[in-house]
Image: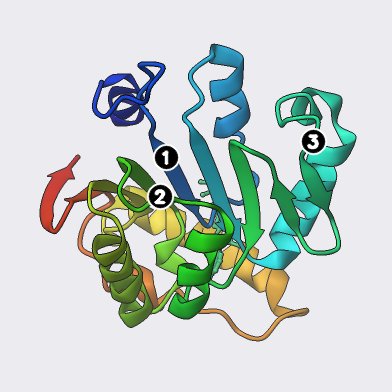
Amino acid sequence: RKLFHQFLNCELKTDEQGNTKKQILSIGAGFDTTYFQLQDEGKAPYLYVELDFKEVTSKKAALIETCSQLRDKVSETASISQCKGEVLSDHYKLLPVDLRDLQKLDDIVTLANIDPSLPTFVIAECVLIYLDPDSSHDIVRWASKTFSTAVFFLYEQIHPDDAFGQQMIRNLEVLLFLFASKRKKIDLAMIEKVPLIYLFFMTISQGMRMVMI
Ligand SMILES: C[S@@+](CC[C@H](N)C(=O)[O-])C[C@H]1O[C@@H](n2cnc3c(N)ncnc32)[C@H](O)[C@@H]1O
């Protein structure tokens, strides 16, 4: 949150009205409500784009359409389609995509009017853990290649071997067991491949910085 607010508060490029235009791209946004909280605080950026699977974005679009507290925070002229899993307004977009499809990610940049030259904060919170390592690398590389000035913020559960990690895995296994009757087997292979419990990982332009806690 602190890094997020630092990004929003810092003054970089200003437009003709003297406002700094910034973008936030939340990949695998789920039901996160940060955009709506930022609206409440008067801190929403020029553009906030959320991506997830259509199954999720359709449900989120329905919530935004029917809940006045959310509906009031996207413009009156916003187009909301539960069927397409889309919300398109001037400053907020919710779009369906499988993040592993990089061609579609390129299409999203155009569809959402994302300007690759604007300062961009890419959030991946508890998402890449669900992908295989190659797909995760591809997504980070895609972000690095696409945006000229960007922060890639990764917040993830890792380091499965200490007491906390072991408990986390037990909790996830119970959940996966409950899912297993309905869905094909899901494993936690990705967790085993990552060395620490929580990691903030930032790429800035083509360079990379890592901060671990
Ligand atoms: C644990 S939730 C995290 C949601 C949100 N970032 C948060 O922290 O509240 C993981 C989200 O990633 C999404 N996700 C996982 N793999 C994805 C993929 N390949 N393409 C799009 N979304 C994906 C899931 O649908 C889910 O909404």
**View quadrant of ligand 1:** bottom right
Q: Counting residues from the N terminus, which is met first, the one under dot 2 or under dot 3?
A: 3
**Residue 125 in the image, given as x and y percentages of width and height:** 43, 49
Residue at 48% in and 69% down = 105
Whole-percent x and y of residue 165? Answer: 35, 55
The three-letter code of the residue at mark 3 reads: Thr
Q: Is residue 47 visible?
A: yes
SS under mark 1 = strand
Residue topped by disc 3: 77
Q: CA distance from mark 1 to mark 3?
A: 20 Å
Residue 65 or residue 131, whichever sits in front: 65
Circle 2 SS class: loop
User: Is disc 2 in contact with disc 3, using a CB cutoff of under 8 Å?
Assistant: no
Of 109 and 153, nearer the camera is 109
Residue at 65% from the left image edge and 45% from the top image edge: 31
Q: Which residue is mark 1?
A: 23
Q: Is residue 32 visible?
A: no
Image quadrant assignment for residue 82: bottom right
- Residue at 43% in and 41% down: 24
Q: Which residue is mark 2?
A: 115
